[in-house]
Amino acid sequence: MPDCLFCGIAAGEVAATIVSANSRTIAFRDINPQAPVHVLIVPRVHYANLAELGAAEADLLAELVAHAREVAVGEGIVDAGYRVVFNTGQQAGQTVEHVHAHVLGGRPMSWPPG
Ligand code: 5GP
Ligand code: ZN
């Protein structure tokens, strides 16, 4: 998708700190971390949000979630606990229209989120 930031990161055209990557999904550190661990996981192909990805490629969504879990293991936050978030749409605060999972951890978190 032209002019999509996360397509650019997935293609290696926009710099990012890559945590891990495979043929279908890529994990990189959020540029404005909200916790000691804040990693974004995206599919290499473009879908605007969780609903579009889930409707079109449920298997790819499952791979994305599995990759989020691998990141949590690699970051050492599984035992303490962590949060996986898909902001979807304007009121939820989605700012990048390429579906992404946030993996957040490394500090206590409140619920419900703001
Ligand atoms: P959203 O608000 O859409 O759920 O999350 C978008 C996330 O992308 C934000 O947490 C924001 O900090 C992050 N972000 C925005 N621009 C960049 C960038 O250029 N590089 C990286 N690594 N993260 C970015
Ligand atoms: Zn994209």
Image (spheres, grey):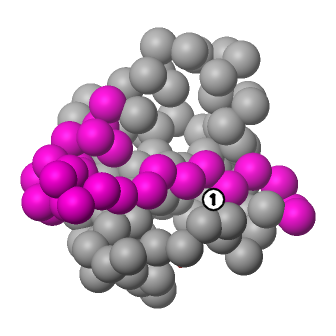
Q: Position of residue 37 (x, y in %)?
A: 29, 72
Horizontal arrangement in the rendering, residue 109 relative to residue 58 (left or right): left
For the residue pair 56 and 83, the one nearer the viewer reads as 83
77 part of magenta stretch: yes
Viewport quadrant of the C terminus: bottom right
Please state the total of marks drawn on the protein image.
1
Horizontal arrangement in the rendering, residue 98 relative to residue 31 (left or right): right
Please give the range of residues in magenta.
66-91
Q: Which residue is the site of mark 1?
A: 4
Badge 1 residue CB within 8 Å of ligand 2: yes
Q: Is residue 93 above or below residue 102?
A: below
Identify the element where label 1 is drawn: loop
What crowding class fits label 1: few (fewer than 14 Cα within 10 Å), some (14-19), or many (20 or more)? few
Q: Is residue 114 above or below residue 51?
A: below
Q: Is residue 47 visible?
A: yes
Q: Position of residue 94 (x, y in %)?
A: 73, 63
Residue at horizontal 88 percent and vertical 64 percent from the top? 91
Residue at horizontal 68 percent and vertical 56 percent from the top? 87
In the picture, residue 62 is in which quadrant?
Answer: top left
Horizontal arrangement in the rendering, residue 33 relative to residue 20 (left or right): right
Residue at horizontal 56 percent and vertical 15 percent from the top? 58
9 part of magenta stretch: no
In the picture, residue 49 is in which quadrant?
Answer: top right
For the residue pair 6 and 11, the one nearer the viewer reads as 6
Q: Is residue 42 above or below residue 87?
A: above
Residue at horizontal 30 percent and vertical 56 percent from the top? 81
Q: Position of residue 25 (x, y in %)?
A: 35, 38
Callout 1 amino acid: Cys
